[in-house]
Amino acid sequence: MALVEGCKHSLEITVPVADVEKETERAVAEIQKKVRLPGFRPGKVPLNLVKTRFASDIRQEVVEKLVPRFFHAAAEKENLHVVGRPDISDLHIHDGEPLKFKAEFEVAPSFELGDYRGVTISYAEPEVSEADVLERIEKVRDQKAEFVNEDPRPLVDGDYAVVSLESISGVAEKVSQDELMLKIGDEATLPVFSENLRGVSPEETREFDVTYPEDYERANLAGRTVRFLVSVKAVRRKELPELNDEFAKDLGDFQTLDELKETVRQTIFREREGKAQQEAKHQLLEQLVDAHDFPVPQNYVDRQIEINVESQLRMFAAQGVDPKSIKLDWAKLREAQKERAERDVKASLILDKIGEREAIGATQEEVDREVQKIARQQREAVPVTRAKLQKDGTMGRIVGHIRTEKTLSLLFEHARKEAPKA
């Protein structure tokens, strides 16, 4: 066995003549059963004729049967954990001689774990102020607001105008809306609407051009200048519910406003704590990767690059962008992803080794909980979801994810936490 570089090894393997001849006879017999030649009944073509006419097929069959078998036997004898398929070269196969070939392949890396408990990280428990709580509650109040009609009068900044509009020119298909509510002077309202409707009273109309940004969310309007006829139908004001115990009771199982505030405080704390711990765990993992220097198989790196790219494409799709419409230079993208992918692979291997040493695993209860969560998201019965996850191999990934998260939690629990520097 020879170490080529990193995780790449090579083996020069010799298959004894006896094994080659035995496999050759078997291949000849198999081909004799199937071959059809003029003048001979099926299965009765003479062996010598089969060997002559189908020498190339016989040789190919022998190679396909013997090379994998003897390669895996040799790798097992050397206690090598082979990753991916080997590259076979220098193939030598001639009648009456041993079969010889060279196999180059990658193996899973072998490395010693360094210290992983007590890693120093920057972390502080998150804080939640009264202002944070009130800001969150104000958002809920805003969602519960009612819009009340006022007596007809000219529109001013801060008013909510109910308008109807229709396009006169600028678009192929007519754009119309019978009841659209706009807040005059608000940053969410296109300035041209506020400028042209300020001072207008209900029952009055205005005609003006609207030039939409190139990145406007509605594709049929993006980058276009459209002339609209706009009629003001009503002026409304926004009324927020009073912030008291009754407001709290309307939101759920709360008796007082203070109970609501405490629940909101705990919710914000959990959100910030989860984010802070996730960042700390990432920081911890980066330190462990820096502290462990070992090569990783290119096979693993290539797979990780695929995972990272697929994740980015799913993110684009979730944002409404068709991944097929994105013109990417895949060669450059893969090269750009390489360093990150190598670190991700190292991190995964280190966590696996720590999990093994600490005897960390996923319990059946934890797996069931995750399956139930996915079933709820998919809106289907748990047994149906479980069967699908087992069939497509996702169940194994779920188990692996649970194990990884538990390992990270153990590392975080035993880390030395220092307050972040100002």
Image (cartoon, helix red, strand yellow):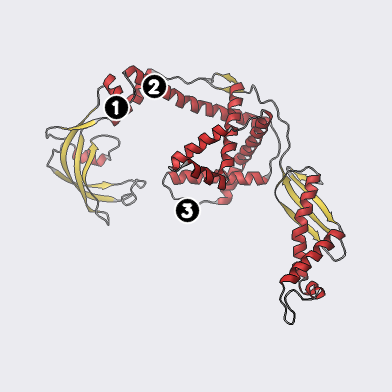
Residue 361 x, y percent position in the rendering? 62, 32
Real-space CA distance between mark 1 and mark 2, rounded to the nearest whole angstrom: 16 Å
Residue at x 46% of width, y 45% of height: 316
Q: Horizontal placement of 121 versus 94: left or right? A: left
Tag 3 or tag 1, which sits nearer the N-term? Answer: 1
User: Is residue 283 something one can see in this rendering?
Assistant: no
Q: How many marks?
A: 3
Viewer-nearest residue: 319 or 405: 405
Which mark, by number, is residue 262? none
Question: Which residue carries the number 1 mark?
Answer: 141
234 shown above or below 17: above
Residue at x 60% of width, y 27% of height: 284
Query: Could you tell me the amino acid type at mark 2?
Result: Thr
Tag 3 or tag 2, which sits nearer the N-term? Answer: 2
Real-space CA distance between mark 2 and mark 3, rounded to the nearest whole angstrom: 44 Å
Residue 311 x, y percent position in the rendering? 52, 43
Q: Horizontal placement of 136 versus 328: left or right? A: left
Question: Which residue carries the number 3 mark?
Answer: 324
Q: Quadrant of residue 416?
A: top right
Tag 2 or tag 1, which sits nearer the N-term? Answer: 1
Viewer-nearest residue: 158 or 318: 318
Closer to the eye: label 2 or 3: 2
Query: Could you tell me the amino acid type at mark 3?
Result: Lys
Q: Secondary structure at mark 3?
A: helix
Q: Secondary structure at mark 1?
A: helix
Question: Which residue carries the number 2 mark?
Answer: 263
